[in-house]
């Protein structure tokens, strides 16, 4: 609709704001103020600082950025962060599905409490989670001692990082699959059952395609969160160079050495890779959803 | 009511597995906080809070949250008003921009401010010449906290206000109400519980933030250490009781926020929130 299709606009009972090219007319006031405030705030808090992040590494030149990122210690931290984050997100898929399933399909005493507890990793400050997980999984801790008997070193090792990232990512998967499991039409399952499908077939051929997109998005969110996670990881990680140093810690170390460009280079790479992953998962999810509908 | 138990054979096994996973990953860590904090008795627990550095850290945390949360609340309301009540091009891009801090590492959220205002930042030399301190000072802590918690209020309000539409506000306009009156008398009563939930979530994250503030704080005890940073300092001193005592305060804040959020969101929508998620 162009402005000319509304000839009566100027004589309307209520003064209608003149519509610009990019905005539809509305009788409500306050758009310029609200939009102006929003853009100014976002500009100051998000856009200007991110511009600094995007530009700062290049003062080293392309070769400098490359050698910064391929420095063995930096490269090891990037590999560790992305590798363990991916592993934890993937392991969280069955765990999240299991807990989502239990919470939606069974009635048992304490179910609502367990349901509320799923959100705890969101609510607990990361430093608190970090020292608590460390105390629990250290050799002197209850579960750490148990693992030690099995010959596993949990805290102060990459396995400890994995545990912290499981903790951080689990709610993302549960909260993504839970509504789908809740809304899933029981009759479809029953139909599959009457057609002779075994429980395994019902799960693999009927349930899984329906929850696939939600599961994927939960895994993607858990991964993106895990890559950047700092507080809950650094206490349990042990932080040995080349062995258990995560990428966010490398940024902190570079900053302590006043190597701003190097820190910015690592930050930029992390941002770009997590964004790429999220975008790819979004695309995959759309494709899955389309196939699910067809 | 339809029976909930579907696979009688598997059900107890799956339930047991769920409880084990939840205990090992989530419930036991929470219990450990309490257990460690009180491991040397109540007196030692309370002694932590008599320490001047702990008190300074609590005060600083309150100050930072008291500045960051209201600013993000005003932003959240303004952004939700623009996005939910008007149609314009580029809306999804704007929403993605608002969500952006959720997908940034907290460390990066702090780093960007150091790149601007740090000693070797873009504005660093100018700030030094004019004797203005942002990094390693309260201002930097506030900026980093604002960045990390920016989306919370907006995220809580936008879906609700989109669902509510703008019919009531349009009716108020035809009755001659002005912009501020409409907001105060029509919109605000409709969104107050969601606004409160958003503010609580924003506040919990602001008070508990660790990664972003650790980059800009400089960690000077009694001066630039917020409570989460003070926990780290105590922990690195092997003062485990102190660290867990301070942690128990933040854990309680998290628990209270979780309960309040669940109750509030029940009140205004009935559906579980998507927001605590980051």
Image: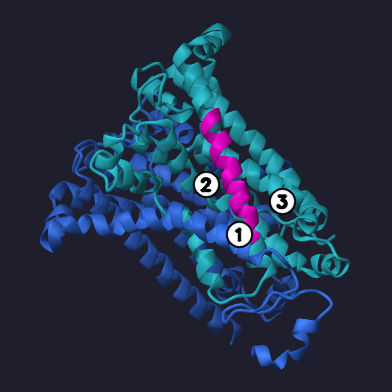
Chain colours: A blue, B cyan
Do tag 1 and tag 2 residues touch (Cβ < 8 Å)? no
Mark 3 to mark 1 CA distance (whole Å): 14 Å
Q: Is residue B152 above or below residue B174?
A: above
Residue that sits furthest to the top in the current view: B43
Residue at figure coordinates x 49%, y 66% from the top left? A216
Work out whether mark 3 precedes mark 1 in sequence or the reverse, and give the earlier one: 1
Residue that sits furthest to the front in the current view: A11
The disc numbered 1 marks a residue on which chain?
B
Query: According to the image, label 1 marks what residue?
Result: B79
Residue at figure coordinates x 47%, y 12% from the top left? B52
First to last magenta residue range: B62-80
Position in image of residue A16 (x %, y %): 74, 76
Whether residue A115 appears in this view of the structure is: no
Q: Are marks 1 and 2 on the same chain?
A: yes
Work out whether mark 1 precedes mark 2 in sequence or the reverse, and give the earlier one: 1
Of B59 and A247, nearer the camera is: B59
Query: According to the image, label 3 marks what residue?
Result: B194
The disc numbered 2 marks a residue on which chain?
B
Helix, strand or loop at label 2? It is helix
Whether residue A29 appears in this view of the structure is: yes
Query: According to the image, label 2 marks what residue?
Result: B149
Position in image of residue A183 (x %, y %): 71, 67
Q: Are marks 3 and 1 on the same chain?
A: yes
Residue at figure coordinates x 45%, y 21% from the top left? B243
């Amino acid at each position: 609709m162009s402005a000319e299709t509304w000839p009566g606009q100027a004589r309307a009972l209520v003064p209608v704001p003149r519509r610009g090219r990019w905005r539809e007319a509305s009788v409500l006031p306050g758009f310029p103020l609200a939009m102006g405030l929003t853009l100014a705030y976002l500009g100051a808090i998000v856009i200007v600082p991110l511009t600094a992040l995007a530009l700062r590494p290049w003062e080293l030149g392309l070769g400098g950025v490359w050698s910064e990122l391929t420095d063995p210690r930096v490269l090891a931290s990037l590999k560790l962060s992305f590798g363990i984050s991916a592993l934890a997100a993937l392991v969280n898929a069955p765990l999240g599905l299991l807990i989502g399933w239990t919470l939606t399909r069974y009635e048992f005493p304490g179910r609502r409490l367990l349901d509320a507890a799923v959100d705890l990793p969101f609510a607990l400050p990361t430093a608190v989670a970090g020292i608590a997980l460390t105390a629990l999984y250290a050799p002197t801790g209850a579960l750490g001692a148990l693992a030690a008997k099995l010959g596993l070193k949990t805290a102060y090792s990459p396995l400890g990082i994995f545990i912290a990232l499981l903790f951080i990512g689990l709610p993302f998967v549960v909260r993504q699959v839970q509504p789908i499991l809740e809304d899933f039409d029981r009759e479809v399952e029953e139909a599959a059952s009457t057609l002779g499908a075994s429980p395994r077939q019902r799960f693999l051929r009927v349930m899984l395609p329906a929850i696939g997109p939600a599961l994927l998005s939960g895994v993607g969110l858990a991964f993106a969160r895990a890559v950047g996670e700092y507080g809950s990881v650094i206490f349990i990680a042990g932080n040995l160079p080349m062995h258990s140093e995560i990428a966010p810690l490398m940024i902190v170390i570079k900053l302590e050495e006043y190597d701003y460009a190097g820190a910015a280079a690592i930050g930029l790479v992390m941002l770009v890779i997590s964004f790429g992953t999220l975008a790819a998962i979004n695309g995959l999810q759309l494709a899955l959803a389309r196939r699910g509908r067809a | 009511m339809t029976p909930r138990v579907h696979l009688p054979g598997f059900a107890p096994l799956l339930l047991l597995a769920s409880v084990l996973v939840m205990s090992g990953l989530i419930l036991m860590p929470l219990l450990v906080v309490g257990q460690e904090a009180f491991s040397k008795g109540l007196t030692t627990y309370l002694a932590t809070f008599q320490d001047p550095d702990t008190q300074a850290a609590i005060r600083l945390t309150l100050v930072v949250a008291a500045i960051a949360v209201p600013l993000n609340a005003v932003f959240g309301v303004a952004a939700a008003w623009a996005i939910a009540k008007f149609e314009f091009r580029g809306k999804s891009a704007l929403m993605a921009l608002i969500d952006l801090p959720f997908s940034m590492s907290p460390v990066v959220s702090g780093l960007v401010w150091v790149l601007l205002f740090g000693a070797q930042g873009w504005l660093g030399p100018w700030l030094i010449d004019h004797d203005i301190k942002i990094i390693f000072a309260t201002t930097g802590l506030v900026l980093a906290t604002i960045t990390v918690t920016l989306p919370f209020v907006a995220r809580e309000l936008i879906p609700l206000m989109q669902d509510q539409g703008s019919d009531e506000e349009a009716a108020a306009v035809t009755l001659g109400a002005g912009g501020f009156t409409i907001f105060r008398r029509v919109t605000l009563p409709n969104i107050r519980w969601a606004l409160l939930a958003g503010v609580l979530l924003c506040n919990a994250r602001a008070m508990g933030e660790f990664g972003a503030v650790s980059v800009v704080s400089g960690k000077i005890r009694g001066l630039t250490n917020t409570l989460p940073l003070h926990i780290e300092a105590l922990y690195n001193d092997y003062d485990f009781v102190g660290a867990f005592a301070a942690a128990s305060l933040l854990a309680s804040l998290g628990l209270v926020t979780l309960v309040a959020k669940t109750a509030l969101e029940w009140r205004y929508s009935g559906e579980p929130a998507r927001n605590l998620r980051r």
